[in-house]
Image: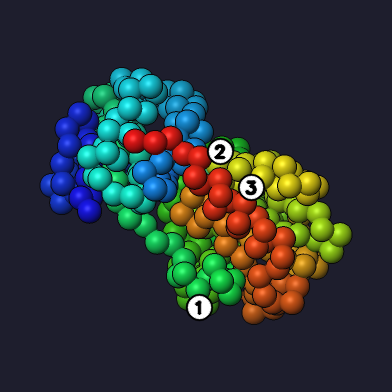
């Protein structure tokens, strides 16, 4: 497949697409991104990702020149040109180019990138047997420092540090708490548990998590299948008392998590509810936007 990049109006092969070293995200992390999947030549939840991106652009006051409808078409056209059945799309939008923090002193023409590529987060066995999680010491960034709903490039230094902690402990994923000690999310995914009564729970947005698009999809699918799904505050107690746990994300998709801090969750194997959600999710991925 061609790994292609649309960058500021031009298509490049991956290797030759470049931005200035004074790009504000390169210098300060001052940019936003979206990770999107396409399955069988259909882009999954494209409008939801674009909405999240453009809310971020408005909140951070980027002087975005490319309209949402235009970017939507660029994504579809770039996928078509890459001519691959399934893969991963990365959109980056940065504030512009220039040295110094003050946006008034830089060229406020956002650098806009759409990359069509491949991404594998967890090994295929994780979806069959479940993955392992560990609690890490890195807390999610407080909402009064940086709103967690913003998918900013700079925020991810913290998530990468959390991932390093998980790697050191030999776990597949690191689980982060918020500053108050409530469960928040994984380094690149949202957390769900299934309790003994079959109720599905997931940390509330106010716990300091990214409002995941896969999370929202799973909530809707589970409710549609008759489950009671609650967005609540949860502690580690809730997780260890749960019968099942799973993670959701564009890259992660829906993946069972069967051990945390080496302790089994429920019976230590992917549970029935999780497997049903995985099936529903896989079915839902057929409903993307065709290119
Ligand atoms: C920190 C974090 N939480 C949750 C998610 C899941 O979000 P989504 O389902 O929109 O991919 C991501 C995905 O990028 C993430 O980085």
Do the residues under discs 1 and 2 have CB atoms within 8 angstroms? no
* Disc with the residue nearer the chain's start (1 vs 3): 1
Residue on which disc 1 sits? 170
- How many residues crowd around disc 2 within 10 Å: few (fewer than 14), some, or many (20 or more)? some
Q: Residue 236's quadrant in the figure?
A: bottom right
Which residue does the image show at 44% across and 51% down from the upper left?
A: 156
Which residue does the image show at 62% across and 42% down from the upper left?
A: 216
Instruction: Depth check: give the residue in front, 184 or 105.
Output: 184
* Residue 2 coordinates in the image, percent (x, y): 20, 50
Number of dots carrying numbers: 3
How far apart marks 1 and 2 lie (CA) works out to 29 Å
Relative side of 46 to 41, left or right: right
Relative side of 84 to 47, left or right: left
* Disc with the residue nearer the chain's start (2 vs 3): 2
* Disc with the residue nearer the chain's start (1 vs 2): 2
Instruction: Depth check: give the residue in front, 96 or 64.
Output: 64
Which residue does the image show at 49% across and 45% down from the upper left?
A: 286
How far apart marks 1 and 3 lie (CA) works out to 28 Å
Residue on which disc 3 sits? 218
Residue 51's place in the image compared with 148, above or below, is: above
Residue on which disc 2 sits? 149
Mark 3 residue element: helix
């Amino acid at each position: 497949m061609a790994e292609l990049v649309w960058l500021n109006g031009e298509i490049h092969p991956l290797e030759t697409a470049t931005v200035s070293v004074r790009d504000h995200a390169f210098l300060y992390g001052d940019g936003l991104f979206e990770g999107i999947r396409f399955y069988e030549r259909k882009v999954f939840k494209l409008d939801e990702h674009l909405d999240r991106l453009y809310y971020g652009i408005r909140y951070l006051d980027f002087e975005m020149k490319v309209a949402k409808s235009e970017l939507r078409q660029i994504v579809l056209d770039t996928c078509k040109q890459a001519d691959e059945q399934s893969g991963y799309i990365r959109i980056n939008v940065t504030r512009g180019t220039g040295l110094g923090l003050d946006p008034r002193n830089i060229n406020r023409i956002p650098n806009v990138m759409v990359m069509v590529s491949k991404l594998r987060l967890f090994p295929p066995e994780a979806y069959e047997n479940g993955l392992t999680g560990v609690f890490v010491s890195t807390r999610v960034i407080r909402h009064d420092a940086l709103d967690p709903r913003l998918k900013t490039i700079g925020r991810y230094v913290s998530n990468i540090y959390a991932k390093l902690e998980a790697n050191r402990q030999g776990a597949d994923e690191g689980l982060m708490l918020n500053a108050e000690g409530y469960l928040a999310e994984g380094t690149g995914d949202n957390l769900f548990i299934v309790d003994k009564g079959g109720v599905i729970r997931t940390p509330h947005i106010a716990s300091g998590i990214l409002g995941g698009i896969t999370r929202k999809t799973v909530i809707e699918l589970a409710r549609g299948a008759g489950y009671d799904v609650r967005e609540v505050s949860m502690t580690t107690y809730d997780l260890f008392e749960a019968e099942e746990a799973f993670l959701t994300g564009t890259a992660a998709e829906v993946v069972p998590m069967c051990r945390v801090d080496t302790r089994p969750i429920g019976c230590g194997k992917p549970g029935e509810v999780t497997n049903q959600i995985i099936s529903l999710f896989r079915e839902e991925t057929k409903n993307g936007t065709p290119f």
